[in-house]
Image (cartoon, coloured by chain):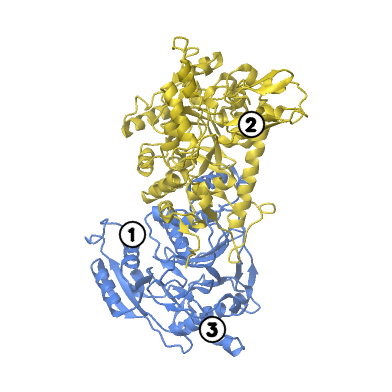
Chain colours: A yellow, B blue
Amino acid sequence: MSTAPKPSESEKKSDRIILDKFQPVFNRDACQMCKRCIKECSYGALESKGNRIWYKGGCVACQRCAAMCPTRSIEIRQVPSQMAPHATYDDRVRQAITSQASTGGVLLSSCGNDGPYDHIFDDIVLDAAQVTNPSIDPLREEVETRTYLGRRSGKVTLSGDGCVAESDGSGPIVAMDMPFMLGHISLGAVSYNTQKSLFMAARNLNIIAGSGEGGLHADFFQYADHINSEVASGRFGVTPEYLKRTAAVEIKIGQGAKPGHGGHLPGEKVTDLISSTRMIPLGTDALSPYPHHDIYSIEDLQQLISVLKESTEYRVPVGVKIAAVHNVGAIASGIVRAGADFITIDGFRGGTGSTPRVIRDHAGLPIEVAIATVDRRLTAEGLRNRVTVCAGGSIRNSADMIKVIALGADVAMVCTSALVALGCRVCQSCHRGLCAWGIATQRPELVSRLDPEVGAKRVTNLYNAWNEELKEIMGAMGIDSVESLVGNRDRLRYLGPNPKIAEAMGLKHAGEGWG
Amino acid sequence: MHERQNSGYVDLRDEYPLLPSYGAQRPPGLERMMGGCGIAGTIDVTGAKMSGEAIGRMLTTMSERENGLGAGYSAYGLFDNELKDAYCMQFFFDDEKAMSTAEEFLKNRGDIIKDERVFTQKVSTMKPPYPIVWRYFFNPNPHSEKFRIRDQHPDECIVDMVIGINGTIPGAICISSGKNMAVFKGNGFSYEIAEHYDLGRYSAPMWLSHSRFPTNTPGWWAGAHPISLLDWSVCHNGEITSYGVNRKFVEMNGYKCSLLTDTEVVTYLWDLLVRRHHLPMQVAGFALAPWYHKDIQRLDPRSRALAEQLRITYKEAFLNGPFSILVGRSRPDITMIAMADRKKLRPLLFGRSGDGRRLYAASEECAVRVVEKDTAETWVGNPGSPMIATVGKGIVRRGTEEPFQGVFC
């Protein structure tokens, strides 16, 4: 950057229409001038001058200063629009244009798609039991949420002595206490303390957590029984030890936040820790290729699945993760036929630590439609009971989780909610590596802000609560075990603006009974 | 058969507007039927035949459990000589055209050994239409080019044909297709259906029966229970909350749901697990109503391994929600299976006559006592645990044993 020519005075002026979207407002009477806010702001947005705190610019609304102010005298406000109103060239459009005109680059962003698309989840309503079947109170009666991940044979054969015949059991299976897993969040995108919190929580909850594509730090081998290790196109940190230790292996073809793109970890985040775990040089951008360069078609995928099964000695299930794209049903079918033990579908609102904004905001399919399509396609081909299907990409709460299961997922994949539990305020600045909450950063002074013990407890609390809510809802539906909810679209109704969407998902419209 | 009217019972149809009635053709807009019901079954394990009059009394006495929108009976061990080895295919036809189309369908796929009208008589209180009820003793020809897959086992040919007819010939429904068994069912009260078919003229070593209290669905002759495929027939009281999942599972295994009752899915599941996957009946019963994971941990290692594998592999076969079912089959031996869901949310009671020859399973004890006043012993089974009784073997399971008793050797 030092070689880049300095912007001229007139260039600076045209850049000036990029306005700050947020600004902290101070209650001067309450402020004690302890200057803690200045220390907490990793974006350097505050300064003290003349015995007052002043806002310099660059606030991302991460809320760190407001949360840490001992006298609660800071409030983050959205700055009122200063531009002339225009419904087509809204502020967002104008700012993007201006920004690109200044830099000439691809705009980066993070977290999930923040565009104003409809949330189909919010257009779906759940059924409950009345009269003809009794609802079940999970506080008094058993309601089960145990979930298995792995391949199934579709048939149990008993040998002469009545025991299950060896050949006709299932493939390697992972048992989880709850029908969800933590998605892949790599060490690199997030801090050591963040990943530790997540792995500890996964162990507490007896579920699995994704390693992300950054390999597995030696300190985390102790959590290996609860880790789903990712093999992505960069193959960062993929060693036999990494694969063999963990509970499951997942080939990452795509990610909902950036379908068709590889990983992108800016060099600033590649510290000693990351460099040793990923096995890449210090300070270099870790750019994983868009496709796997040994997978240019489905038969290549089949080979990689076989190779991974061989190298893990058929001890763990091997899955494939894809982004939800238009032909997702057929692709999923091919993946099952290629031998995957589980498939993960990631919807277009899925999160990320860094992605080109144009991809994040415009490519892919909502998970609601994608999962229903995959479930129907695999059912039609008689494959659905052979494979475990996971789905994620904006599962915001237990209601979304319940709906995604009823739409066809065995397992809901959750990510952003776990980070929010750790302190994330979804300010969408992960790609800058300055996360004031110690999550999406590698700066030691920021990383230490997150206590893994506290973090793990909060994530555990969150998902225990979701699981309780799942039991409550299933009980109300008269269902006492979660497998009877999987793909049970009969118990959902569509209450949205577009009946065609309901048709694509195989849902009846609200008001339609059974006869 | 008219005890209810004699005892001052008020026919609800005098008070509420009549729902329309349908024969073989599916009622328009009907996508799934549900409701509460009464079930009763009896088997003589020595193989001695019992008159159909007794089962009629057993069912009819549970008068709170029906509202006149469907009842039915199935009889096992009904035929003699060469007829008992042929598939007895019984149909509802709405008209002659449906009948001739179905007959053509049969003739293209095998030999009709004998056919006859099933005896029916007008019952003054029953509302038309009455479908034509016809019976064909039939042997399929697995080499027929009409079969999509040739040279299958004759059972598979029959399954294909039943699914083919029920799905494609308007106004024709195959209501039973097993060997040495037949189903008698229709839209009416239990005593009306018994009189309509004059059940007293039949005697058989095993009878199952069902009366229906549907919620807001029209009466439909073909949709009444028992629902039957091959020699399986199922009477079912309950509402399966996992229907969408179970339906997907049977459809993945080649069945096609045309009757839209959860009972149809239950029937196909028994056929799939026992006939096609060769699971012992109590193992199939466990797959349909499995133990809780925490209870499975209490089992011995062999049983635990089997239980866990069943829960994993057959998770879509798990029937969730309240039910009690009676299941009958004629091959290899005439057998009655009776079980309730794993929380036992619907009633089911077992009974045995003083001389031990007759076994009973019913929703209410009165159904047993009406034919076996003081002499019968009665008991209840465990949730999800099947009672199994077989002609020639006696009582195989009382429904109170460990889940896999008798499976390992």
Q: Who's the residue at 62% across and 44% down the image?
A: A467
**CA–CA distance between discs 1 and 3?**
42 Å
User: Does mark 2 fall on the same chain as mark 3?
Assistant: no
Which percent across, then down, holds residue B286? 54, 54
- Look at mark 1 in the image and give the residue it sits on: B156
Which percent across, then down, holds residue A68? 71, 27
Q: Mark 1 falls on what kind of element?
A: helix
- Look at mark 2 in the image and give the residue it sits on: A422
Q: In the rendered structure, find residue B13 and report the number of the disc placed on it.
A: 3
Q: Chain of mark 2?
A: A
Say what amino acid the circle numbered 1 marks.
Glu
Q: Mark 2 falls on what kind of element?
A: helix
Q: Of marks 1 and 3, which one's residue comes earlier in the chain?
A: 3
Q: Residues within 10 Å of mark 2 (few under 14, many from 20)?
A: many
Say what amino acid the circle numbered 3 marks.
Arg
Which percent across, then down, holds residue B92? 37, 76
- Residue B303 in sight: yes
